[in-house]
Amino acid sequence: MAKQIITLTDAAVERVKSLMARADDAILGLRIKITSTGCSGHAYDIKYAHEHVAGEEKVEQDGAVVFIDPMAIMYILGSEMDFVEDTLQSQFVFNNPNEAARCGCGESFQVKSEVAAS
């Protein structure tokens, strides 16, 4: 059986659905991209998805919709997306088996060498 690109925790499902419902304009879901940035090399970039772009994967889970940029798939394959809140912040976090390291501030990550070479 093929590995799922990404799964969402119950908290992430609820947050994605909440963001979809309260967006100022019509959106189809959220889009996840990976950008080159930060001290570790890569960062998750999450934005509203207004359309389904050719080549990207669409993940639907319990009413939540997430689009995965084609260039991000190899970096997040098998990941779990969660949503956490505490007294100071709220954010999506990723439990990513492809991460080799994460910077001290948690803003960027480095992938395992076999993933980077793919």
Image (tube, rainbow, N blue to C red):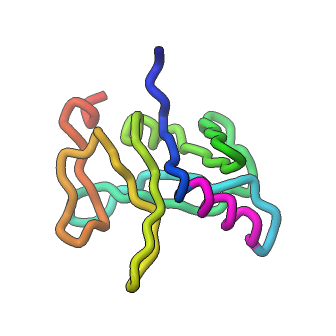
Relative to 105, 19 lies left or right: right
Residue at 55% x, 43% y: name it: 68
Residue at 63% x, 42% y: name it: 61
For this rendering, which residue is in front, 75 or 2?
Answer: 2
Does 48 appear above or below 96? below
Relative to 30, 72 lies left or right: left
- Residue farthest to the front, as pictured: 10
Q: In the rendered image, which quarter is residue 113 located in?
A: top left
Does 59 appear above or below 13? above
Does 85 appear above or below 3? below
Relative to 37, 45 lies left or right: right
Residue at 28% x, 39% y: name it: 98
Q: Position of residue 40 (x, y in %)?
A: 21, 59
Magenta residues, dominant SS class: helix
| 69 is within the stretch colored magenta | no
Q: Where is residue 35 in the image (x, y as percent from the top left)?
A: 40, 56
Q: What stretch is highlighted in magenta?
A: 13-23
For this rendering, which residue is in front, 78 or 107?
Answer: 78
Residue at 22% x, 30% y: name it: 114
Q: Where is residue 10 in the image (x, y as percent from the top left)?
A: 54, 52
